[in-house]
Image (tube, rainbow, N blue to C red):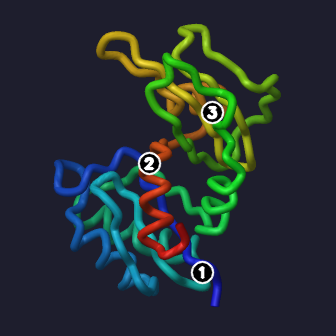
């Protein structure tokens, strides 16, 4: 059996306009052939098992569009990747007193980009500390009510849709999967 997978839906907020509710989301993935489907939090993060993760997510997308009008991208990663990243402690030595959040930004493909890491945006509110294939690990800062957006930075640089989760979300997800 393959390692569990996680699908990270972009701009999903369960139960809100333009997004499915939890039952619809989990039902769409189950009907598409996923096993052990567990929606995690309300941000469109779902743990599941299957031998064909991309096919399952593509099939579920049809149901999500017809049932809730949801058409945003879905980014799939193996749980093992997340465990490996957490085990590597990638944020060690990068945060300071201004750090607001540690984040994981998921994206697929895009134009080639070379960055000298750590990289800081011009607003000085996002530091990308590590890039892996389809994953940017970042620190964000928050001035007053505006936090930096690694999603916006990755979408601008790579020219592809992206979605971001906090380190805390990833840690709780891995723990919920019995791996943390």
* Residue 177: x %, y % from top left: 47, 73
* Residue 57: x %, y % from top left: 48, 70
Q: CA distance from mark 1 to mark 2?
A: 28 Å
Q: Tell us which disc is closer to us: 1 or 2.
A: 2
| Residue plotted at (60% across, 46% down) | 107
Q: Viewed as shown, does residue 134 lie left or right of 104?
A: right
Q: Secondary structure at mark 1?
A: loop
Compared with 46, 91 (above or below) is above
Q: Residues within 10 Å of mark 3 (few under 14, many from 20)?
A: some
Front residue (pair 162, 166): 166
Labels 1 and 2: the sequence-earlier one? 1
Labels 3 and 1: the sequence-earlier one? 1
Compared with 47, 173 (above or below) is above
Q: Residues within 10 Å of mark 2 (few under 14, many from 20)?
A: few
Q: Secondary structure at mark 2?
A: helix
Labels 3 and 2: the sequence-earlier one? 3
| Residue plotted at (47% across, 26% down) | 149
Q: Which residue is mark 1?
A: 52
Q: CA distance from mark 3 to mark 2?
A: 27 Å
Q: Which residue is mark 2?
A: 168
| Residue plotted at (31% across, 62% down) | 65
Quadrant hosting residue 158: top right
* Residue 163: x %, y % from top left: 48, 43
| Residue plotted at (24% across, 56% down) | 14
* Residue 78: x %, y % from top left: 62, 68
Q: Which residue is mark 3?
A: 159
Front residue (pair 160, 171): 171
Q: Tell us which disc is closer to us: 3 or 2.
A: 2
């Amino acid at each position: 059996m393959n390692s569990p997978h996680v699908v990270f839906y972009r701009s999903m907020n369960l139960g809100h306009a333009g997004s499915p509710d939890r039952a619809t989301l989990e039902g769409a993935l189950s009907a598409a052939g996923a096993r052990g489907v567990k929606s995690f939090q309300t941000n469109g993060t779902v743990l599941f098992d299957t031998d064909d993760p991309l096919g399952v997510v593509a099939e579920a997308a049809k149901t999500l569009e017809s049932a809730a009008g949801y058409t945003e991208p879905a980014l799939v990663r193996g749980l093992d990747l997340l465990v490996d990243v957490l085990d590597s402690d990638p944020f060690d030595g990068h945060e300071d007193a201004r750090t607001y959040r540690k984040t994981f930004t998921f994206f697929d493909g895009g134009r080639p980009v070379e960055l000298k890491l750590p990289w800081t945006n011009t607003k000085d509110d996002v530091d990308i500390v590590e890039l892996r294939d389809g994953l940017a690990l970042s620190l964000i800062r928050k001035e007053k009510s505006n936090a930096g957006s690694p999603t916006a930075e990755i979408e601008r640089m790579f020219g592809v849709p992206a979605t971001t989760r906090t380190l805390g979300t990833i840690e709780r997800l891995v723990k919920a999967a019995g791996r943390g």
